[in-house]
Image: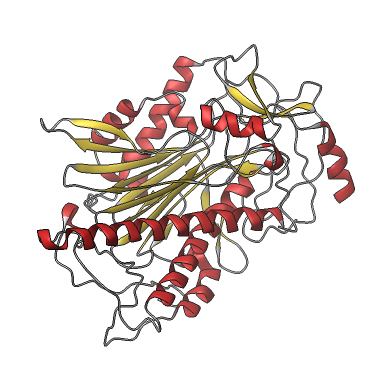
Amino acid sequence: MGCCVSTSSRSTCSSGSNGDMATPTCLEIGFCAKKRARRTFSDHVISLHHLSSLPSRIFTNGKSRGSCIFTQQGRKGINQDAMVVWEDFMSEDMIFCGVFDGHGPQGHLVARKVRDTLPVKLLSFLHSYESKRNGSAKACLKRNMKSDGGDNEKDISSEDKLNSTWKEAFMKAYKAMDKELSSHPKLDCFCSGSTSVTIVKQGSNLFMGYIGDSRAIMGSKDSNDSMVAIQLTVDLKPDLPREAERIKQCKGRVFALQDEPEVSRVWLPFDDAPGLAMARAFGDFCLKEYGVISIPEFSHRLLTDRDQFIVLASDGVWDVLSNEEVVEIVSSAPTRSSAARILVNSAAREWKLKYPTSKMDDCAVVCLFLDGKMDSESDYEEQCFSSATIQSNHSGNPIESDDGQKSEPSLQRNFTVRSSEENEINGAVSVDVEDGTAPADDQNWLGLEGVTRVNSLVQLPRFSEERSKSNS
């Protein structure tokens, strides 16, 4: 496979729900004793420099063994949504999925940075825990969640420990991610940020960590074999009482504008800016002292045979489609590999019908089918994608291009921030997606023109322009 790496080793556990391996009560990170050669974690880290080369990881429109993903640019400028599916994440029964919705002048770069870096940080913390737990990582304890009555207390303790370990890993990974953004030398996250909804499926275990207003739901069958929608995450917006209370205690302000009374926003104590429409996010460091945090909500769920698929999507989908409508659209798609694309197309139609005078938001969707199966039809090869495309740069590594041209991606028009005055130039912010370096040619970011339904930000703080000038 060249530089392609999988940190997996096959499990010998018997089958469990959804056709997966039986659920272990320990972290199976690929360190089970095997006769065949194994990659070390340091080998894996070196290979992660070439993330785009991993065959088990997809981050642009397409499909994998058990999932499909699709994103489409809205009418606000460059697509600020990002997504990823990473199969064989740490073992062959484990898969990582994430959707990230950027906002602000460099929101698309923040979202892509988080997409590439957050899973690696999660992997690193889990490996560190497993190494300490197993000493020299010579063995991996495996135990079914099912047991005899005499072992109930032991099983409950093991399940609590498993839950605690994953929660700690998500917390540390999110904290490290935000810290890296805060000190990034070439990516200004002062007034830019991103949501994050991430899940890890390991056997019948589902672990979730999330911030912002991107959402995950599950399609499941009820006792009558009818499809029902189960919301897995909570939209962490400022109108939630606990979120609003924290922000106010930190001297931040929470209120809605008169022309959009249903949208609560976070404001600086001394300026009617930036008006962030979420209570938790990566980046947005202008608000981190005033109650906006990057600490994720964490939850753990045991999957059953009735659970069919999971959908992760940015708010461009949830603004116009209900959970039930999304489950209906995905479950009725003619092929599984087309489900994400059809869902995005349905959202685009709803935007035109419900908000004809507003600019459609970006949409990103991940559909994960829990039985791990996909249809065999290769209909994706005949489709015309309207968003990011894969190209190759001079080094042969694929890069993303939002305009379909053979050039380095750069920030052009962005309509996430609305200014109360005329459009102002806030400095050149053309940045390479992979390493954050700025090309020689200058591109200017401009404020919003026209009308949109809901922007993640309203306007930049007055001091942000001075800060930008001082850094240039």
Residue 268, horizontal then vertical, whole percent: 74, 31
Is residue 231 depicted above or below 198 in this figure? above
Residue 400 in view, yes or no? no
Way the structure is coloured: secondary structure
Q: Which residue is found at the position 70% from the left and 26% from the top?
A: 418
Residue 137, horizontal then vertical, whole percent: 37, 81
In the figure, is residue 322 to the left or right of 281? left
Q: Which residue is found at the position 42% from the left and 23% from the top?
A: 349
Is residue 129 or residue 31 the one in the foreground?
Answer: 129
Q: Which residue is found at the position 42% from the left and 76% from the top?
A: 131
Is residue 440 depicted above or below 237 in this figure? below
Is residue 99 or residue 293 the one in the foreground?
Answer: 293
In the figure, is residue 264 to the left or right of 383? right
| Quarter of the image where the N terminus is located | bottom left
Residue 113, horizontal then vertical, whole percent: 59, 54
Residue 318, horizontal then vertical, whole percent: 43, 29
Q: Which residue is found at the position 61% from the left and 27% from the top?
A: 455
Residue 19 in view, yes or no? yes
Specify the quadrant of the image occupied by residue 361: top right
In the figure, is residue 333 to the left or right of 412? left
